[in-house]
Amino acid sequence: MDFGLSGLAKWLSTPPASGLEPREVVAQAIGWGEGAYASTLFSDATRLLDSSLPTDVINVLWSAAVRRAYEEEAPWLDGRAWLREIVGLVVDRYERAELGEPHGGEGAKIDSGSRDAVLAEIEAMAAPLTAATENDRQGAVRGVVPALRRVVTEVDPDLGFRLFLRALKAYGVPITESRYVRYHELGERFGYHELVVDDGSLWVLGGGESTPSSREAY
């Protein structure tokens, strides 16, 4: 299953979370699997917090990940405040469990090969992903592709790839089988379990284990 912020976005987008406050969902995610989620949430959140990305770019990324319309100055959304709250909840859990300080957010190195590979996949899907995110009735968001590019080049290709996959899944953007195979190959490069790349949510034409789509694939 997915992990970190992209995994949390799925938690917040699924029906069981509908009756809970976002903070409660984060607390559940942090406690899942004896805290297996905690370190990756801390790592993703601190990388974004420590980055030069503007808050509005973080807002766009999060809106696309949970398929919720983005409105500037919306009272519910402040990407950096949200990330700080996630970090605080992780630290609190570590303190209560007497686990010391969480680690994992600092010193992420951008591998040029992985960066270029992720950017190539984003560019290949730029047009259909832009159309899907900007024209969606439920969660219209502008600027998703440029925001993803910035995560990959300025923060971390791993996180950028997971957020890219999450947006494809959230908006049901169809892909070909060959692209599906490439995503799994990239996932192997990052050390993912196969369910991180696809837990059945990707829309793939031509078979595979994912949900087939009747729409045009790119």
Image (tube, helix red, strand yellow):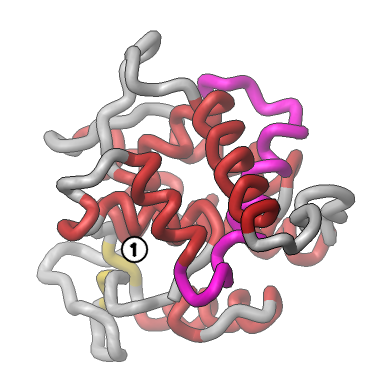
Q: From this viewpoint, is residue 120 visible?
A: no
Image-quadrant location for residue 35: bottom right
Residue beneath the point at 19% across and 59% down: 16
Q: Is residue 178 above or below residue 67?
A: below
User: For this view, does 194 lie left or right of residue 119?
Assistant: left
Give coordinates of residue 127: x percent, y percent. Answer: 38, 45
- Which secondary structure is most common in the magenta stretch? helix
Q: Is residue 158 above or below residue 19?
A: below
User: For this view, does 91 lie left or right of residue 30?
Assistant: right
- Quadrant (top left, top right, bottom left, bottom right) of the C terminus: bottom left
User: For this view, does 78 lie left or right of residue 50?
Assistant: left
Residue beneath the point at 54% across and 74% down: 34
Q: From this viewpoint, is residue 46 visible?
A: yes
Segment tinted magenta in the rendering:
32-57
Q: Secondary structure at mark 1?
A: loop
Give coordinates of residue 133: x percent, y percent. Answer: 30, 39
Q: Is residue 95 above or below residue 56?
A: below
Image-quadrant location for residue 159: bottom right
Q: Is residue 106 above or below residue 1?
A: above
Q: Looking at the image, which residue sits at the far bottom?
A: 208
Give coordinates of residue 67: x percent, y percent. Answer: 28, 43
- Quadrant (top left, top right, bottom left, bottom right) of the N terminus: bottom left
Give the amino acid type for the residue marked by disc 1 in the picture: Tyr
**Looking at the image, which is closer to me, 66 or 188?**
66
Residue beneath the point at 83% across and 58% down: 112
Q: Which residue is mark 1?
A: 218
| Numbered-mark total | 1
Residue beneath the point at 72% across and 43% down: 47
**Quick check: is 4 in the magenta stretch?**
no
